[in-house]
Amino acid sequence: MNTSEPQVFKGHIIPGFQLFILGMAVLVAGGLLLGILIYASQAPDAAEGPTFWWAIASVLFTLVMFLPLMFAKTVMRVGEETVSVECAWLSRTEFSLEDIEFVEEGPVTGISQGLGSRVLGSAHTGYLTGGYSVNFRFKDGKTITVSCDDPDAALAAVRQAAGGHLAVQH
């Protein structure tokens, strides 16, 4: 195996999040559309004016903005010296393997923990798309939780990249 290429682990968005995002998109777009219909019914010539078309554009824009979130994922790259994390195209972080005190399988997360980069507690950040996760505990007391579809493989890769000297807890 070529050690210069980072090993990549993904955490795909869970179906519950997809349904939640779809529901929010329908709720927001439906509310906008209802407002447009009410406005158009009160002013018959409104359907021909620029305000009507801006309103229709805002409904379409809302749907387009929500759509990518339905396919969000967390990508963790374990390299020779660093681990980088990208979450839902919105947030990124990178940290050195030397800064890690230990790594362990994290909790199963869901809608209640949120999507994206989240503050999960004092000195605890999550990069979440739901499902299984990996916890990185650092020497300075901070913790990062990263969504990952295969936490066992990610734990093994981090331990191997750290030269086998990193404590792995299960």
Image (cartoon, grey):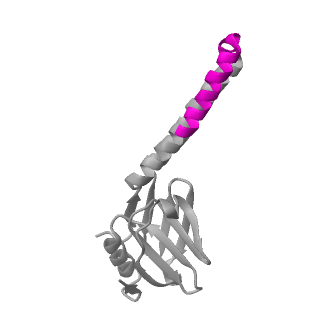
Of the 4 image quadrants, the one containing the C terminus is bottom left
Could you tell me what secondary structure mostly forms the magenta stretch? helix
Answer yes or no: is residue 61 visible. no
* Residue 36 counted in the magenta span: yes
In this view, 53 is above or below 48: below
Which residue is pictured at 39% across the width and 61% down the height?
A: 10
Specify the segment rendered in magenta. 27-49
* Residue 109 counted in the magenta span: no
Answer yes or no: is residue 141 visible. yes
Count of labels shown? 0
Of the 4 image quadrants, the one containing the N terminus is bottom left
Residue 34 in picture, x, y percent from top left? 60, 28
Which residue is pictured at 46% across the width and 68% down the height?
A: 146
Relative to 164, is 65 on the left or the right? right
Between residues 23 and 117, which one lies in front from this camera angle? 23
In this view, 1 is above or below 138: above
Which residue is pictured at 38% across the width and 85% down the height?
A: 169
Between residues 95 and 114, which one lies in front from this camera angle? 114
Q: Residue furthest left?
A: 1
Residue 49 in picture, x, y percent from top left? 70, 14
In this view, 104 is above or below 31: below
Relative to 150, is 96 on the left or the right? right
Between residues 57 and 97, which one lies in front from this camera angle? 57
